[in-house]
Amino acid sequence: MKKDSVFNPWEVKGDVDYGKLVKEFGISLMEDLPNVFSKNLLFRRKIIFAHRDIQRIILAIKNKKPFVMMTGLMPSGKFHIGHMMVAQQMIFYQSLGAKIYIAVADVEAYNTRGLSLDGSRKIALNEYILNYLALGLDPKKADIYFQSSRSKEAQKSNAYYRLQNLLAKHITFAEFKAIYGEITPGKMVSALLQASDMLHPQLPEFDGAVPVIVPVGIDQDPHLRLARDISQRIKSKNFIQLSSTYNLFAPGLSGGKMSSSDVNSYIALTDSKEEVERKIKKYAFSGGKDTLEEHRKKGGNPDIDVSFQYLKFFFEQDDKKLEKIYNDYKSGKMLTSELKRITIDKINSFLKEHQRKREQMRKYLDEF
Ligand code: TRP
């Protein structure tokens, strides 16, 4: 990694070398999956590119056995198209019959980012949860909770925090340092709480002994390694080993990772059509050549072109159409201005519909 790159569960900066991380972390590249998965764009295009133990979930789906999908969000500013990937996975697993658990990581945000619990709550509700609902998450089949206040039912709440505390005995300080490098008490508490997030669905107070799949970005894998290791050391509990999948990060407009701390790196789901147009035209990194003549002659590079990546990750559902755009851009038949036009129009027609749905869903927010 380059000198100014940072990569840990709390901060990702600079280019990400996925191949190196896959090796270093010991995760598996995604193999070919059953048909139910390939209907989903993210799986079909290998944007969800790696996993640990996904077989257990495939088996549960095949045998129509219950399973849980558990994930969490760190409330951090605007909800952007990069955040949409995990939301789409929630909705996908929900359609396959999974029970969904979603942790709002307000304790983690407090301990590692200095955000107030109140501030986290506002961002989580108005940015994240509202958009999940508008994207199609059924709140009746999802257990959405705040880390700082697990449940109104004492038995459930006790079980969740008890587990977090008991996990602490099964890991050493040296292991913490080996997994995370620099570690603070706040990070330790957050890591143990996240382990409880991922494991507690299996407790008798919750869904009992069911397999759990955790879809995340690859930066979260240290938390998974820790939770997987500790879970097998608590002999009294019989945890089924966690499964997980890893999606690529959505590229930021000018490269790197899309990040809510940099306005010019993201397309937010609240952006107006003028903003989308301005951002794509001005900031979206282009794989085109410097002059029209050169572009026509040598062609562009869709593999590094951010507009093309957005079509591939999110906005062009039709594989044939995507392939044609790929080939036309690569041969020089399609110009950067044309590719950007297609992308702007696709994003804006999606956002128009989405923003309408979001206003309809606002009334359900009170329940949280
Ligand atoms: N640490 C995660 C993040 O930064 C949020 C999170 C909290 C989470 N609990 C989780 C993710 C459980 C997956 C599973 O985004």
Image: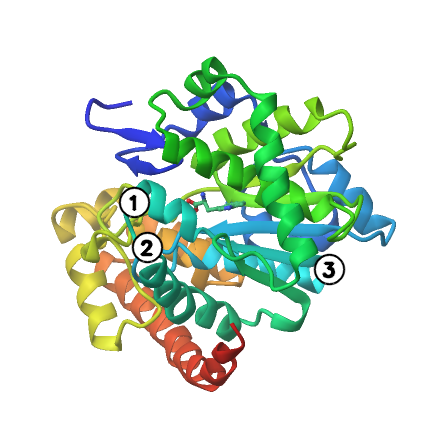
Q: Mark 3 sits on what residue? A: 96
Q: Residues within 10 Å of mark 1 (few under 14, many from 20)?
A: some
Q: Is residue 359 left or right of residue 233?
A: left
Q: Position of residue 63 (x, y in %)?
A: 87, 49
In front: mark 3 or mark 2?
A: 2
- Viewer-side residue, 339 vs 80: 80
Q: Quadrant of the N terminus?
A: top left
Of 367 and 126, nearer the camera is: 367
Helix, strand or loop at label 2? It is: loop
Q: Residue at x 74, y 47 (%)?
A: 34
- CA gap, disc 3 to disc 1? 35 Å
Residue in the image at 25% along x and 29% along y: 5
Picture quadrant of residue 249: top left
Q: Is residue 271 left or right of residue 282?
A: right
User: What is the three-letter code of the residue carrying label 2?
Assistant: Ser
Asked whether mark 1 and ligand 1 are closer than 8 Å, the reply comes as no
Q: Residues within 10 Å of mark 3 (few under 14, many from 20)?
A: some
* Residue at image mark 1: 113
Residue 319: give x, y in percent of width and height: 54, 57
Q: Earlier in the sequence, mark 3 or mark 1?
A: 3
Q: Which amino acid type is marked by label 3?
A: Leu
User: How far apart, in angstroms, are the residues tagged by discs 3 and 2?
Assistant: 29 Å
Q: Is residue 193 left or right of residue 152?
A: left
Q: Quadrant of residue 123?
A: bottom left
Foreground tag (3 vs 1): 1
Of callouts 2 and 1, the N-terminal one: 2
Tell me: is circle 2 under 8 Å from ligand 1.
no
Label pair 3/2, CB-CB below 8 angstroms: no
- Residue that badge 2 annotates: 76
Which disc, if any, is residue 329? none
Question: Mark 2 touching mark 1, by CB under 8 A?
Answer: yes
Amino acid tagged 1:
Arg
